[in-house]
Amino acid sequence: MRVFKFGGASVKSAEAVKNMGSIIQAHDNGPLIIVVSAMGKTTNALERVLELREAGKDYQREWQAVKDYHGNIIQDLFSSDENETFLAIESLFGHAELILRQTFAEQGKAYDQFVPYGELISTTIIAGYLRQLQLKAEWIDARRYIKTDSVFKDAKVRWEVTEELLKLNLPTILKENIVVTQGFVASDLSDNTTTLAREGSDFSAAIFAHCLNADSVTIWKDVPGILNADPKRISDTAKFEAISYREAAEMTFYGASVIHPKTIKPLANKNIPLKVRSFERPGEKGTVIHLKGSEQPIPCFMFKDKQALMVIRVKDLSFVQEESLRKIFHILAEHRIRINLTQNTAVSVSVCADWDSVKFQKAKQDLEKDFEMETHTELSLVTVKNPTSNALKAALANKEAVLEQRTKSLCQFVVSES
């Protein structure tokens, strides 16, 4: 059994969906699960609609644009507007509109109930199109099978119950059908929709693969495989033919955007190969991540934008020692702040983390009981693995580092985004 994952760029238009259909037809030779993201930039668009609604502003123009975008794709893919896919999409948009009219008390719950409609809609369209190609495709709702805790926008998987549900239900479906399902989307034990954090569809594919002991996972991207740098930032890039799970995990942690950071561990635990291939050139091999990948000592460049730097000092000017560090990191963990870099001096702790205004404000309130704190935003974290002098020049691009850490094998710099 194999798992294929298609991201938003691979299904952003009717032509893109047709190309995906051709890839599926070429691989219709055994049990297959297809995990799909929202189409194109739909997640961004839905976030904008929700942002306007929560601010009490008119969101109808943006909402209509989302509906029109999908409507145009459907018209290009299907021959009749009486097609059952049209009716299913109309129903999904109707349900989404009902959610827009509701008020949710819990932080993030409105997001998790509304934004996943991007995935629910995209997979409904794709399952319908595959059936039009005479492929036996069955749409399933990932929320019925992937179970999590109740932390909205960044839920943690309940692995035992998820594996039990998947093993109980999917093998029978897979005997006769290609399964089409959503990335990013899950639910808690009370059936409230939850999400696996932004860009979490890769992780969804890994969850299905891990729980069902898949032979492989293939992520279809708009790049030829895993590169040593984002070609939009570094002009001279190289592709890896194979890398190890450990190397891939390290790269994703530091900011390599081609794979979601949580994807590697569940696959490595069962030695399931992860392939990254180009949907634009599906005949090419791409990159394989597995146990015996060769770790090539060439410079690798990773970038994380939307970072913030917290500088925390003890109020009474005493030294930062074990008790102070324990308090600081306990508070940051309590507010689920994602730490990417720390640096200590005798009297301060500097923490570079993913910027989230709500989380930072709550953490600041708790920290300021014992510490002084200043926050710097609009920053990026630049990481260079296997650095050379030329690689560091290319990575920094004449920007001055606000904070830096260097070892022989790894250099990290916090720099201004602009």
Image (tube, grey):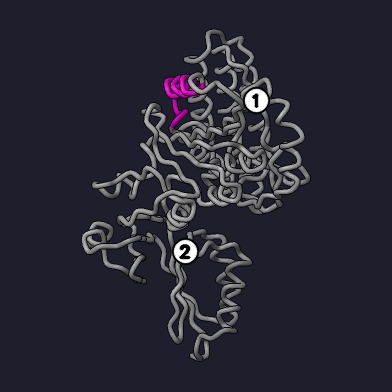
**Viewer-proximal residue among 115 and 13:** 13
Above or below, 321 against 282 in this view is: below
Does the magenta run of residues contain 19?
Answer: yes
Looking at the rendered structure, the kind of residue marked 2 is: Asn
Q: Is residue 373 above or below residue 300?
A: below
Residue 38 visible at all: yes
Q: Which mark is residue 340?
A: 2
Question: What range of the chain is rendered magenta?
Answer: 10-24
Please name whichever residue, 217 or 73, is drawn nearer the observer in this view of the structure.
217
Q: Mark on residue 139?
A: 1
The amino acid pointed to by label 1 is Trp
Task: Give the main secondary structure of the magenta stretch.
Answer: helix
Instruction: Pick whichever, 8 or 231, lies toward us.
Output: 231
Q: Tell me: 251 left or right of 261.
A: left
- Percent position of residue 89, x then y: 61, 22
- The tally of labels here is 2
Q: Residue 233's spot in the image, x, y percent?
A: 29, 49
Quadrant location, the N terminus: top right
* Residue 338: in magenta span: no
Residue 346, given in percent of the width and then of the height, sits at 45, 87
- Residue at figure coordinates x 53%, y 26% from the top left: 67
Q: Disc 1 versus disc 2: distance between alpha carbons? A: 37 Å
Residue at x 40% of width, y 51% of height = 294
Residue 338 is labelled as: none
